[in-house]
Each structure stands twice: as structure tokens, then as C-alpha cells.
Amino acid sequence: MLYMELAPEPVRLRAVPIGGGAVLAEIPAALSATLAQSGLPGLSPPFGSVAVSGPGGERTLAALRPPADLADMEPNEITLAIDAAGDPFDLCTSLDSASGGRLLDFLLGFCRTAFRIGADGDFAALARRVARDCAVPGGEVTALATVPHGRMLVRGGDWTGPVFLLGRSGVCLLDRQTDRRAALRVIAALDADDLLVTTGAQPRLWTVAGVGPALPHVLALIDSQPSARRDIRAACARALLPARAASDAALLRELQVLAPAEPRGHTDPARPLQGVLDIAIADGQDGVFLRGWLHDPLELVQSVAVSSSGNTLELGPDALHRMPRGDLGKVVDGAAFRGEQAATGFVAFCRAPFLAHVLQPTLSLRLRSGATIELVPPARTWPLAEARDAVLSSLGTPAPDDPAMREVIIPVAARLHDAAMRAPRAVSVRRIGQPARAPRQSVLVPLYRTLRFLRFQVAAFANDPDFAQAEVIYALDSPEQAAEVEHLLRGLHLMHGLPLTLVVMPRNCGYAAATNEAARVARGASLLLLNSDVVPVAPGWLATLQQALDAAGAAAAGPKLLLDDGSLQHAGLYFERWTDGLWLNRHYYKGLPRLWPGASDRREVPAVTGAALLVQRDDYEAVGGVCEDYVIGDYEDSDLCLRLRESGAPILYVPEAELFHFERRSISLHQGYTRTTASLYNRLLHHQRWDADIAALMARQDMALAA
């Protein structure tokens, strides 16, 4: 018992537990004023009270957490007797309507949060009984299907205030972002006997009916009610966006793929306004990339907005970057445009979290009259690399300073490429023959599609004594060819006896990633980066390169490379600033005769090509290997050389080592490179990173040549 000095005569107050160590005590009306002024001395917060009235008169109900041991307290004039077996609902009955609303609000508002008893079953039972006693019936809420984290898609309920879920085992306030006005909404987990209640002067109570499980039931519901498809999808999206967990994004993606919206375009040649939104690519982080075309010779469109699931982003006048599209001409879908003006394409990046996982946003063209034309793209899911390539192929052949390239293509492609490179990649390693126990060099050869030089390359390696102490690792970046390539390599091993290792990438990741994965498997102290279309002229070239690298203490060394007609393809790499202000990679003496005097001298050069580049393994690992920020395969070699040069060691050209290079045979087969702006993207990235360093390097190089 707890004794307190609150009344002139001894008073015994009954208190009943409500969960979590808290109790509800009934205070007579005579003590209510004193309570309001003084509280309950000797008790630590929290403490709260609510005034109620009914047929039995006015009184106050107080919620508090008494000390753990009441027997230790000194006796005084008020006794708080806790009835551990009592029913707290006995204190809450026979109240008028207004008092019932105040009590329910007190329990769900103050008591639930102050004593942290929302998950207490006893408290939940009390709240349910009080709600049933004082709330006006609101009807039924129909639970249609379960969505992530046990939440439920529901129909029904006209909620105008805070909404509480009263379950068997706990009480919770629903997400404040819940759209209370919509006919369909997603809320917390429900069971068939759960209650939903709104608090206030007149509480309202809804019961729950028809609980169904999981995504298949959402899809079944959509199939059975096609007219509600858009509302159902929008209700789920409102609850899931922005995606707070991977499962949210996954369900939203699945729902859009399995129950897509109907694409909408306007291609009627009889009308002077036509348009299509043909591609939408959500980046999963900040927004969505859009590509389409618009024919508006009369300039009817005044403003543009993009929306999804009740959320809208207004786009500025320059958000749609307009450009010619050669695939359109003056005909779209077989229909000629009226007049001479052809349609123009557009690209845009719409930055808003609610768009980051949306496959089918709506692009609204608002006309000067106030009318709106909506464009909806087809539903399509994109593997990250394909999404990147689609973005990079959207502009044709832009100039380096094109605003669309700078503001849309580069940031979106970079984000998608980074996500593609960060995706887990478990390689498969297949060893053919018994490799050298402690190889001096590891020869790393990425393969992509073309295998036409493989027989010649392996034969040349096998007939070179230096390869007795080397290992050859092929990294296959087109895994669909794995069986064919392994069969071919096993045949070549049987023919020549040269041990070979095949590393199979899980998907096409590009030159840099394939080379880095091969390097992780390699055991040699030196790494030779070699293209699959490079074939040695004669034995001894690998030892020559290694000796030159060691003697000069160089960071990297590259050989002389010849075209198939015997002319020079590479005698070192240098940089030239082009008329657009950007640096280009150039090869010394390219196209000149094989024995051209300048190409016959061993010398330091700004860089060497990655088609054949020898580097010490420690140096390679110190700079992080080949940079994977470039797309497909371009500028990685000069980037590697520039990073290696930061140690102060030179880059060496070694003309005594000669190989044929049938250049760019593999990359010419990659549509992600040949049909996109990947080369310009890589060049801009390379220039941004290395402009000042290259300028200083080439100034020193020019001074050395002049001397």
C-alpha cells in the first residue's frame, strides 16, 4: 500500500493493473481538484488522469506506475490498494458518451505511449472492451490481401481522425501516411477479429472481414475486378513508396509486372498533337528516366507533369530535352505526320523518391485549354546493364556539351552502371591441365563472343618456352558460350599440352570486370593484360617485356603491336586534346611502317594500351586493378596507366617485343557499345578525372621531345 497526504481523512483508493506495471486508479470527485493541482506526491512520472462522469456521478481515473514495493512506504492518510486480480474494465463502465470518448482517447493516446504498453495483451483487451462499449459502429472493413510485412490491402472505412488497430495481442496507431480518403488502402496486419477505431468526441468502430493472403490474392482480385485494377495497384503503391525495405520494392515491382497498366499513347495522324512515352526506367534510388517522342507543331502543350499512385511531380519547361530521332522520320506506327514537321524525341530524368521503383509512370501533357493528355509506357523490367545501354542509346550522336547528355544521360547511366557492377557476381573457375606450381607471369585474356583468334593465340603460347613458367587464364564475359569455349580449350590443351584456366563470368560485365576476376584467380607475380585478338609474332616476347619492366623499375610495360598488314598499330600511347576540348587516346606512329625509326626505340611513354600490358601484381592491386566505372571496354587502360604513374614509376614501351593486334574485333560485336554513346560517356568520364594530370604530363612529354 502507498500512503499520501492528500485528504483530511484517510481514503482508500482502488487501483487495477492495465499492463506493463501500470495501474488505473479511481479518484473520488472530492479529490479531483487536489489531484489537478498537486498530482500524486512520491510518485515518479509518468502520471496522467482523465475526468469522467456517468449515473454514479463525476470522478477521475488516474494512470500511474507505483513503486515496486509498497510495503516499504511510510503510512499516511491516503491508501492506494492494488487489486492484482481485479478487472480494470469495472472502473470504465457506466459512462456517458462524451466520457467514453475521453477515456478511450486517454488509453490509446497517453497510456499506450507513456507506459509503452501497446504490445501488452492485457492492455489490448481493455482497449477493445472500452472501444466496443463507447464507440459508434462504423461498419465492416474488408481485408482483401496481404502485402509485405504482414500489412493488408483493405476496402472500406471512412476515417477522419487517428486510426488505431486493436488486435488480440496489441494496439498500434496506423501509419500516419495512410490515405484515409481512398476507397482502397494498405494498413497494418489484420486478423478477422481485429478492430479499427477512430478516437475523438465520438469514437467510431469498424470490424474486419475477409482476410486473404499474399500477392496471388491481389492478382486474383485484379483479375476478378478489372475495373478496380488501377485503384488496387495505386493503393499498394501508396503504402509501399518510398520503398523502405527490399521486400517493399520487390512486391511493388512484381505487382507492376504481373498486373501492368495499359500503355497509352496518342498516334492518330488526323490530329495535330501526337506523342508516345516508349521507355521508363526507374533507377531504384532517386527517380525515373523517360524517353519518348512528341509531335506538337501548333505548340498546344503548355506544361508537363509526371505522376504515379496519387503523387505528382511538376516538370519545368526545360525538363524534357528535345532532340531528333532518326528512327521516327515522318512516320510513326505506319502513319504519316500531317505537314512537314517530323516528331522530335525527348529524354528526361524525373527526380522524386516516389518514382524510383515505378515501371509505368504517367506523363501528363497539359494543354492551354486545361485539358490533359496522358502517356503511359509499356511495362518492362530491365536488367541493370540493359537499362544502362538503353539510356546510353537514347540520344543518337550528341556533342560532348549537349545538355541532355550532361544532365540526363550521364547521371542516370552512371547510377545504373554502378548498380550493375555492384551486383554480386559468382564466377565459375575451370582448370584444364596441371598449371605451373609457381608461375612467374599470369596472362589474363578476356573473351567476348569472338573466338576466331583463340587457336592461333594458344598455339603461339604453347610454342614459346617462356610459357612453361606462366599461366594462361581466359575470362569469358559472354557466359552463354561457356560450353563451347570449354570444349574448344580442352581440345587445344590435348593438342598442345598447354595448361589453361577458364573463368566464366555470371553475365556480361565488361572488359574491366572480366580482367579483375581473372586477376583474383591468378597466382603470378606479374600480370599480363592481353586481348583475345592479339597474337605473338615470335617466341621470347614475354621474357623480353618482363626483363625490361624489372630493369627500368617501371610501373607498366607494353610491346610493339602490328596491324595485320605489318604496319604499326601501337608504339606507346599518348594524349591529344581534340577540337572539342576533350582528350583523346592516340597511338604513336599508327599506320606507319613496322621499322619506322621512332618506333624502334625503347622509351618512356605517357601510357600503353591494355591490349598488351605487363604490370607487377603488387602495383596492380595497390591501385585497385582496372577501373570498372567505364562502360563495356574503353579508356580503362589509360586510366590504369595514369593511376600507376602516380607512384612516380615510368610507363615503358618495349619495341623488341612484337605482337599482331587485330584491333577492336570483340567490342565491335557489343551492341551496348556500338549502338550507344558509351564511347563518349567513357571519354567524358576520363577527361573529368584526368584533365589536369594529362595536361601536365603532355607538357613534360612535349618538352622532352623538343630537347
Image (cartoon, rainbow, N blue to C red):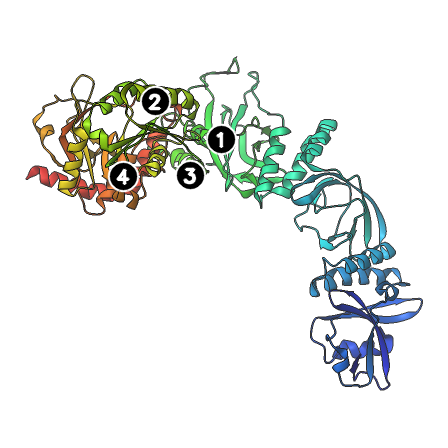
Nearer the viewer's eye, disc 3 or disc 4?
A: 4
* Visible residue check, residue 399: no
Which of 318/370 is in front? 318
Which amino acid, by three-letter code, is at mark 3? Asp
Instruction: For marks 2 and 3, give the one nearer the viewer.
Output: 2
Question: Where does the image place residue 500, in percent across and percent down from the top left?
Answer: 32, 27
Q: Which is more foreground, mark 4 or mark 2?
A: 2
Q: Is residue 12 visible?
A: yes
Which element is circle 4 on?
Answer: helix
Mark with earlier residue (2, 3): 3
Image quadrant assignment for residue 157: top right
Return the residue at label 3.
Answer: 418
Q: Secondary structure at mark 1?
A: loop
* In the displayed structure image, the side of residue 261 where residue 276 appears, left or right: left
- In the picture, the disc for residue 489 is 2
Camera-side residue of 528 and 135: 528
Residue at the disc numbered 4: 640
- Residue on which disc 1 sits: 383
Query: Upstream in the sequence, badge 1 or badge 2?
Result: 1
Q: CA distance from mark 1 to mark 4?
A: 28 Å
Please state which amino acid type lies under the numbered disc 4.
Leu
Left or right of residue 291, residue 14 in this image: right
